[in-house]
Image (spheres, helix red, strand yellow):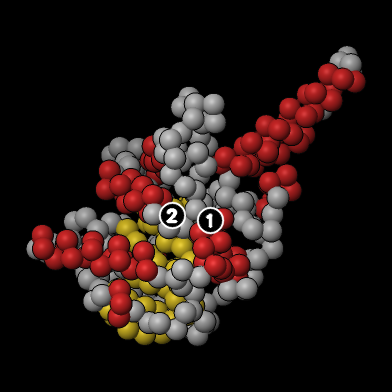
C-alpha cells in the first residue's frame, strides 16, 4: 500500500473500537441537525451577575462542548481544524464538513470501461476510485444513474442482485465509480453468493487506488443486521467509508418508521462500536436529494488523495 493511501486511510477511517461510556454515553441523543449544536455553543452570552472567572470558565466549557461535539459527530476533512468549524461549513442532510480540498465536482462525461469477475482483473492505471456497495435492493443503480445524470449507465432492474461483476466507470477521464455486486437478497445459488463475497473482499483489501467505499443504507426500512455487519467488517479492516442513506424521499412511510427515525436508529447502533461517527449523507435517486452534496464530498476526498 502506498504511503499516500495509508495516510488517507488513517485520516478518514473511524476505527472500530470498544465504546467508552465517558466518550459516548448511550443515553446521548443523536440528531440529524448539527447546525444548532455548533452555533448555539458559540452564541451563549454570559450573564453580568457572574464574576469574570466564572464567565471565563463558562466560555471555556462552551468551547470545549462545541469541540467535543465536532470531533464526535462531524466528519472533519483534512485542512480543517475542529475549532474552525461553523454551521455553514456542514453539508445539508449530512454530518460532513466541507474543507479546502473540495473542488470542481461536476461530472462532464462518463464511460463504461470493463467488468471484472476477479479483483486482479480490475483496471491497473492507479486512477482514484469510489466503490459503491449495498444490499441488492438498496437503490444502488438508481443512485449511480442520478450521480452521472444519465439513465441506464448502471443497470436498473426490478430483480435485486442484477450486478454480478465489478464494473468500472471512468468519470471525466480522471477517476472511477465502481459498481460492486449487491449483497443480501440476490436470487442466485449459495455458491455464487459466496464467490461474490470472496472476490469483493479481495477487491477491498488489495486496491491501493480505492479512496473510499460508499456504503448504501436503505433509510426506508429499519436498520438491517447485514448492513451493520458489512460496516463493521469495513471498519475492522480500516477501509474508509461513507454511509449513503438512500430512499430518503419516502418521508411518509406507510408502515413502520420514517427514514429520519431509521437513520437515527442506525447511528445509535453504530455508536456502540464507533467512538466517532463516519461521514454520512441523506440521498434520493428519485428527487436528486443529496446528489450535489455527495459529489462535493467525493471531490474533497479525491483531491486530497490525488495531491
Q: Quadrant of residue 117?
A: bottom left
Tell me how many marks there are.
2
The local secondary structure at tag 2 comes to: loop
Q: Quadrant of residue 83?
A: top right
Q: Residue 146 at x, y = what percent?
A: 43, 69
Is 74 situated above or below 216?
Answer: above
Q: Quadrant of residue 58?
A: top right
Q: Residue at x 32, y 83 (%)?
A: 114
Q: Residue at x 53, y 56 (%)?
A: 10
- Report crowding for label 1: few under 14, some 14 to 19, many 20 or more residues within 10 A (C-alpha): few
Q: Which mark is residue 259?
A: none
Is 82 situated above or below 242?
Answer: above
Of label 2 and label 1, which has the lower sequence position? 1
Q: Residue at x 33, y 45 (%)?
A: 228
Report if residue 261 is visible in the image. Answer: no
- Label 2 to label 1: alpha-carbon separation: 8 Å
- Report crowding for label 2: few under 14, some 14 to 19, many 20 or more residues within 10 A (C-alpha): some
Report if residue 66 is visible in the image. Answer: yes
Callout 2 touching callout 1 (CB < 8 Å): yes
Q: Residue 71 at x, y = what percent?
A: 61, 42
Judge from the rendering whether residue 163 lies leftward or rightward of residue 295; answer left or right. Answer: left
Q: Residue at x 54, y 26 (%)?
A: 22
Check the picture and name the quadrant holding the C terminus.
Answer: bottom right
Between 138 and 279, which is closer to the camera in this rendering?
279
Check disc 1 and report the residue beneath it.
10
Q: Residue 164 at x, y = what percent?
A: 22, 71
Q: Residue 97 at x, y = what percent?
A: 62, 53
The local secondary structure at tag 1 comes to: helix
Between 213 and 22, which is closer to the camera in this rendering?
22
Check disc 2 and report the residue beneath it.
238
Judge from the rendering whether residue 291 lies leftward or rightward of residue 97; answer left or right. Answer: left
Amino acid at each position: 500500500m502506498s504511503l499516500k493511501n495509508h495516510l488517507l486511510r488513517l485520516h478518514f477511517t473511524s476505527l472500530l473500537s470498544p465504546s467508552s461510556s465517558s466518550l459516548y454515553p448511550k443515553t446521548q441523543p443523536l440528531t440529524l441537525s448539527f447546525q444548532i449544536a455548533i452555533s448555539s455553543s458559540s452564541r451563549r452570552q454570559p450573564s453580568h451577575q457572574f464574576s469574570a472567572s466564572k464567565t471565563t470558565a463558562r466560555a471555556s466549557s462552551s468551547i470545549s462542548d462545541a469541540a467535543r461535539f465536532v470531533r464526535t459527530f462531524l466528519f472533519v476533512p483534512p485542512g480543517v481544524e475542529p475549532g474552525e468549524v461553523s454551521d455553514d461549513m456542514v453539508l445539508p442532510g449530512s454530518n460532513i464538513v466541507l474543507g479546502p480540498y473540495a473542488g470542481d465536482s461536476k461530472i462532464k462525461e462518463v464511460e463504461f470501461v470493463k467488468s471484472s469477475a476477479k479483483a486482479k482483473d480490475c483496471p491497473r492505471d492507479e486512477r482514484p476510485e469510489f466503490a459503491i456497495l449495498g444490499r441488492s435492493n438498496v437503490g444502488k443503480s438508481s443512485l449511480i444513474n442520478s450521480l452521472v445524470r444519465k439513465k441506464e449507465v448502471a443497470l436498473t432492474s426490478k430483480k435485486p442482485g442484477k450486478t454480478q461483476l465489478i464494473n468500472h466507470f471512468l468519470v471525466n477521464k480522471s477517476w472511477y465509480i465502481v459498481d460492486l455486486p449487491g449483497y443480501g437478497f440476490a436470487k442466485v445459488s449459495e455458491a455464487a453468493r459466496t464467490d461474490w463475497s470472496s472476490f469483493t473482499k479481495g477487491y477491498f483489501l488489495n486496491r491501493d487506488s480505492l479512496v473510499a467505499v460508499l456504503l448504501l443504507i436503505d433509510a426506508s426500512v429499519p436498520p438491517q443486521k447485514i448492513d451493520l455487519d458489512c460496516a463493521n467488517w469495513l471498519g475492522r479492516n480500516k477501509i474508509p467509508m461513507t454511509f449513503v442513506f438512500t430512499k430518503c424521499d419516502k418521508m411518509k412511510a406507510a408502515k413502520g418508521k420514517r427514514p429520519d427515525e431509521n437513520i437515527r436508529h442506525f447511528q445509535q447502533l453504530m455508536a456502540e462500536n464507533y467512538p466517532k461517527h463516519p461521514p454520512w449523507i441523506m440521498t434520493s435517486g428519485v428527487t436528486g436529494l443529496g446528489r450535489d452534496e455527495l459529489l462535493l464530498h467525493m471531490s474533497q476526498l479525491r483531491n486530497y488523495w490525488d495531491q
